[in-house]
Amino acid sequence: MHDAAPVNPWVALAYLVAGVLFILALRGLSSPQTSRRGNRFGMIGMTIAVVTTLVTHEIASLPEILAAIAVGGAVGWMIARRIAMTAMPQLVAAFHSLVGLAAVLVACAAFLNPIAFGIAKMVIPMIGQPFAVIDPVSRVEMGLGVAIGAITFSGSVIAFLKLNGNMGGKPILLPGRHVLNLAVLGGILALVAYFTQDQSPWIFWTITVLAFVIGFLLIIPIGGADMPVVVSMLNSYSGWAAAAMGFTLGNTAMIVTGALVGSSGAILSYIMCRAMNRSFLSVIAGGFGASDSGGGAAAASDRPWKRGSAEDAAFLMAQAEQVIIIPGYGMAVAQAQHALREMGDKLKEAGVRVKYAIHPVAGRMPGHMNVLLAEANVPYDEVFELEDINGEFSQTDVAFIIGANDVVNPAAKTDKGSPIYGMPVFDVGKAKTVLFIKRSMGGVGYAGVDNDVFYADNTMMLLADAKKMVEEIVKNLD
């Protein structure tokens, strides 16, 4: 692929405008109030970038391009219409895998036909087909692009399987995994360096295969409680893969867009790691949040607990001065966010202060609970992050937990053998009363850890489908 007019100032200006719009999109997405505007900026910027690329590059015929856009757009439209909010995390992981696979395919195409991509340093005439010597700088870009893309693809596939329930949420700990991971990563970097000196096909394909393998190895040891960070980190990887391929293609828009996605994903992962008391480097290395010695918890049937009803819950909350609601993935599964907002409105009409507490890793992707509450039109000023509200539980009458577990589990502070140990959690036990909605006492959270809050003296368990229970509470608040 060659730029038709590589020094055309209008092309540079178009890519600059697209880049500015991408930055404005990221800024808009930093707040629920401005997220729709941010999405519009992103869509406009991408349209400008795509149209500019199509006009200035000799890629394929216009009918072929329009046909590909039509097919991809139709598939995306159908998926967007049919996908449930509960399936959004695995959908994001699947889309990340496609970005990684695209980077791998572009790198393979560039390696097999460097003349068409304009990265041949020289062409040596030979009998049959001329041999193109790839520019060493392009080999570095190509090697890194295919490696990061392959890691993103295989890692995202494993993340999808875990999130979709095709694989268990518990960490799969291979013996000597850290040594194995370091050896494979070291081998990839060494081969990329050697690739700059020798462009033999076996080197390129070995890099590709090892990268697919390390993506698999990095994700399987990661437990369910840490999957939101995994999704964020894979998003970062997909951006860096796109940026690397942007250099290979000589496409400024891809470089800028990929760098923005990669850096923003890395920053988000770092913020989430701090919120979970995890090491950022351990995220990159894989296997964080996992321990070879799992902390066991007593079975639910072996310990006494108190069961309550919708009538009990409605009475307690109606008499309260403040209620803090902590939503989790169970709320998403039951699609209970609209009923929950109605319950909050009823309580506010009765003079009760209602607040929503969102943990950074609640759900299975970053911002999962924020999206659901925004969908239900919960006021933004009633939604608080962990560090802003955790100190209020000791002055709260009722902590209402709906479908959450790991983010309120005190084992994160007390059990060093627990897979969630070290993760900051809500201090719900300090509230006067804890109302805990879950389907049954037999299940545990995604991390597979039992919760002492179930059995506390101030806890009342509300065993039912989350949506049905909240609807019953709303009826009893009338």
Image (cartoon, helix red, strand yellow):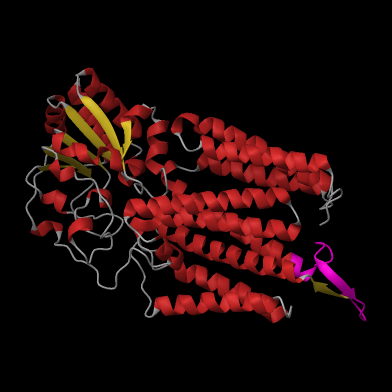
Left or right: 126, with 60 as reference point? right
Q: Main secondary structure of the magenta part?
A: loop
Rendered-image quadrant of the N terminus: bottom right
Residue 86 in the image, given as x and y percentages of width and height:
41, 45
Q: Residue at x 28, y 23 (%)?
A: 345
Location of residue 398 with respect to 3 vertically, above or below: above
Location of residue 279 with respect to 263 vertically, above or below: below
Q: Is residue 115 magenta?
A: yes
Q: Quadrant of residue 162?
A: bottom left
Q: Quadrant of residue 343?
A: top left
Left or right: 137, with 123 as reference point? left
Location of residue 282 with respect to 13 vertically, above or below: below
Q: Residue at x 82, y 41 (%)?
A: 9
Q: Residue at x 17, y 62 (%)?
A: 297
Q: Quadrant of residue 13?
A: top right
Residue 149 in the image, given as x and y percentages of width and height:
60, 63
Residue 145 in the image, given as x and y percentages of width and height:
64, 64
Location of residue 380 with respect to 152 vertically, above or below: above
- The front one of 21 and 375 is 21
Residue 154 in the image, given as x and y percentages of width and height:
53, 65
Instruction: Give the extent of the magenta segment.
Output: 110-129
- The front one of 164 and 293 is 293
Q: Is residue 311 magenta?
A: no
Q: Residue at x 23, y 34 (%)?
A: 324
Residue 378 visible? The answer is: no
Residue 334 visible? The answer is: yes
Rendered-image quadrant of the C terminus: top left
